[in-house]
Image: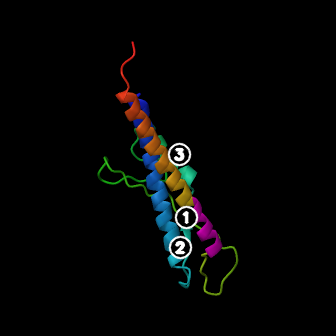
Amino acid sequence: MIASLDATLDFQGQALLLRAERQRLIAGNIANADTPGYQARDFDFARALRAASGAARVGEGIAEGVTGSADARHPTLHPGLRYALPAQTNLDRNSVDMDRERAAFADNAVKYEATLRFVGAGVRTALEAMKAPNQA
């Protein structure tokens, strides 16, 4: 039971770190919407999560597209960033599409909140199971 909870929390922790990083990137894109020549950045969340969870599961430490920090107890994920493709050409070569960025920001925020709720529910369930009297 504890091993299962630990694995679930590790996975969800990786997801939260990646969601937070993605939110930071999207916020940066929005902040630079009027900066000439700025190229919007993003990453493939599912691919980064597979790489991060695969490294944790296999014990490799560092997976393709994800680098770890010097402190192995608190990994900082840096997923492989890519440039967003501009929806239309601009004279100032800025590739930020505000509609796309706002939608991505809202979607990522909702998924971050859902992950937090999932973690909270898992912890509450485990605590309740530990409080229950042993049944033989």
Q: Residue at point 57% right, 56% down?
A: 44
Kind of residue at badge 2? Asn
Q: Nearer the viewer, residue 16 or 56?
A: 16
> For residue 77, which quarter of the picture?
bottom left
- Secondary structure beneath dot 3 equals helix
- Secondary structure beneath dot 1 equals strand
Residue 97 relative to residue 16: left or right: right
Q: Nearer the viewer, residue 54 or 110?
A: 110
The residue singled out by tag 3 in the image is 50
x, y percent for residue 113:
50, 54
- The image shows residue 104, relative to residue 10, as above or below, that is below
The residue singled out by tag 1 in the image is 42
x, y percent for residue 40:
56, 72
Of the numbered discs 2 and 1, the one sitting upstream in the chain is: 2
- The local crowd at label 1, few if under 14, some if 14 to 19, many if 20 or more residues have their Cα within 10 Å, is many
- The local crowd at label 3, few if under 14, some if 14 to 19, many if 20 or more residues have their Cα within 10 Å, is some
Circles 2 and 1 in contact, beta carbons < 8 Å: yes
Q: Which residues are magenta?
A: 97-107
Real-space Cα separation, disc 3 to disc 1, in angstroms: 16 Å
The residue singled out by tag 2 in the image is 29
Circles 3 and 1 in contact, beta carbons < 8 Å: no
- The image shows residue 85, relative to residue 121, as above or below, that is below
